[in-house]
Image (cartoon, rainbow, N blue to C red):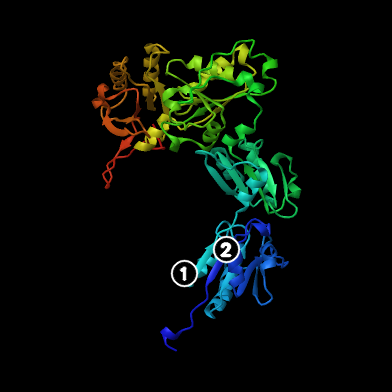
Amino acid sequence: MSVSEQQPTGRLYGVGLGPGDPSLMTVRAVQVIAQADVIAYHSARHGRSIARSIAAEHLRDDHIEEALVYPVTTESTDHPGGYRGALDDFYEQAAARLAGHLDAGRTVAVISEGDPLFYGSYQHMHKRLAHRYPTEVVPGVTSISAAAARLGRPLAEADEVLTILPGTLPEEELTARLSSTDTAVVMKLGRTFPAVRSAMERSGRLAEARYVERATMSGERTDALAAIDADSVPYFAVAVVPSRVAEQSYRAPATDRSTASAPTDEATNEATVPAATDEAATPAATAAATGEVVVVGTGPAGPLWLTPESRGALAAAEDLVGYTTYLDRVPVRPGQRRHGSDNKVESERAELALDLARRGRKVAVVSGGDPGVFAMATAVLEVASQDPYRSVPVRVLPGVTAANAAAARAGAPLGHDYAVISLSDRLKPWEVIAERLGAAASADLALALYNPGSRSRTWQVAKARELLLEHRAPDTPVILARDIGGPEESVRTVPLADLDPTQVDMRTLLIVGSSQTQAVRRDDGTEPVWTPRRYPEK
């Protein structure tokens, strides 16, 4: 038989059946099943297939049924390739069986619950067969959509980010991802439920989380995730953290939260909240709600520098308080109030945040870099130590420091012992700064110098250079790192003797090497700076 006379192959279909209720199958799914010669479905060794049970009323007596029975599910195996090897062999064998039908000209429909390409069993057949045969994938309603519908809660609204996670991830990974996202769905519960619940609690999402079991199927159950007994959770269950934006409409009426209300500019979402009076912040006024202050480090620039924990805290806050420049790094969220100010009123910002928390608000104080390094954590804790605020919960979340960010851009200049000193004499006398510079320089520490200069402080860099040259060689590498992570980022390395104070401003951080710091030009034209970890013996 010539090539042109070869029998045409059959057509492969991946058919999504929806979440379980047969009435949620699409019209196209029913059509494909009706015209197929072969119906294939996966099952465990017990032989019962959920996919087959969903499509049962549409199966004909003359359908050829191919039950693709997994050799293992969660148990161990003696296969030489282990669990993954056993499954890979099974998928190859199953694909070969289906290929036999397709080569014979039969139409094959591989049916699967949910959507075929969303954690679906069909996808393993698709990867092995779709490039060889005409193929169509029929999408289906996912269990995620079914769970949201059964809860009656939107999954995501406006600019919210929905994250879909398999419960089989390590608990630490689940915790990080739950912390950093707006809304989430965790699939594949069953034996993973204890770790998923723990991750929800550690990420602060447990109170929001809902549980849906067998959505649209017989035995469906929904409840708060915190109320679920781990021993009762099957594989076909999901955990849902619904839309925070949408959840606001399900809260108590505003009249019940009058002490937490504030006038807001509709155009900017900026709130103008006066400091709370002692009367407004009495225990009776705060009994209905417990607020807290979280001091969040945003890193040196935008979202790429945020830790997952910080991202989650910013998303969960009802109020954001901070220097306007840092607040601008945080996306605007509907219903979230923003209280911006200039960079010289740290105590006032701290007091405002603590007053809001006393009213029951969840407040994030936004700080650049790491909040504990020349930033807002100290100001908040200082005010929080005073009598009116001692009962307000305060947490500090770390961020990438300006020194660490600048060092990474330059190489590894802080690879050995180093000191961090601010050159600003606004909060401490220059005599103290000079004494500390001298002590650190004489100890041969690398130095990260914050706040080196500004429009009103123009002489400190020159004086610092003079002091350092008493202890360091003129060719000591000095890194000028400006606007790290920002649109005007620049990183330059100059000898200490050539450090030009006019090239330094408040957006610049200086790193001064030790006697061991090296800067060597590489073949690619770069000149990384690093300080060896091994120090020479005297």
The image shows residue 65, relative to residue 497, as above or below, that is: below
User: What residue is rendered at 65% in x and 42% in y?
Assistant: 152
The image shows residue 230, relative to residue 218, as above or below, that is: above
Left or right of 373, for residue 480? left
Could you tell me how far apart the alpha carbons at marks 1 and 2 are, in whole angstroms? 22 Å
Position of the C terminus, as image quadrant, is top left
The image shows residue 500, relative to residue 184, as above or below, that is: above
| Residue 414 position within the rendered picture, expressed as x and y whole percent measured from the top left | 40, 33
Residue 401 falls in which quadrant of the image?
A: top left
* Callout count: 2
Is the residue marked by circle 2 packed among few (<14), some (14-19), or many (20+) residues within 10 Å? some
> Of the residues tagged 1 and 2, which is closer to the observer?
2
User: What residue is rendered at 64% in x and 37% in y?
Assistant: 208
User: Element under label 2?
Assistant: helix
Q: Which mark is residue 170?
A: none
Residue 51 falls in which quadrant of the image?
A: bottom right
User: Element under label 1?
Assistant: loop
Left or right of 151, for residue 439? left
User: What residue is rendered at 67% in x and 19% in y?
Assistant: 286
Is the residue marked by circle 1 packed among few (<14), some (14-19), or many (20+) residues within 10 Å? few
* Residue 41 visible in the snapshot: yes
Q: Which residue is mark 2?
A: 28
| Residue 163 position within the rendered picture, expressed as x and y whole percent measured from the top left | 55, 45
Q: 356 or 141, which lies in front?
A: 141
| Residue 491 position within the rendered picture, expressed as x and y whole percent measured from the top left | 31, 34
Position of the N terminus, as image quadrant, is bottom left
* Residue 78 visible in the snapshot: no
Q: Which residue is mark 1?
A: 131
| Residue 500 position within the rendered picture, expressed as x and y whole percent measured from the top left | 25, 24
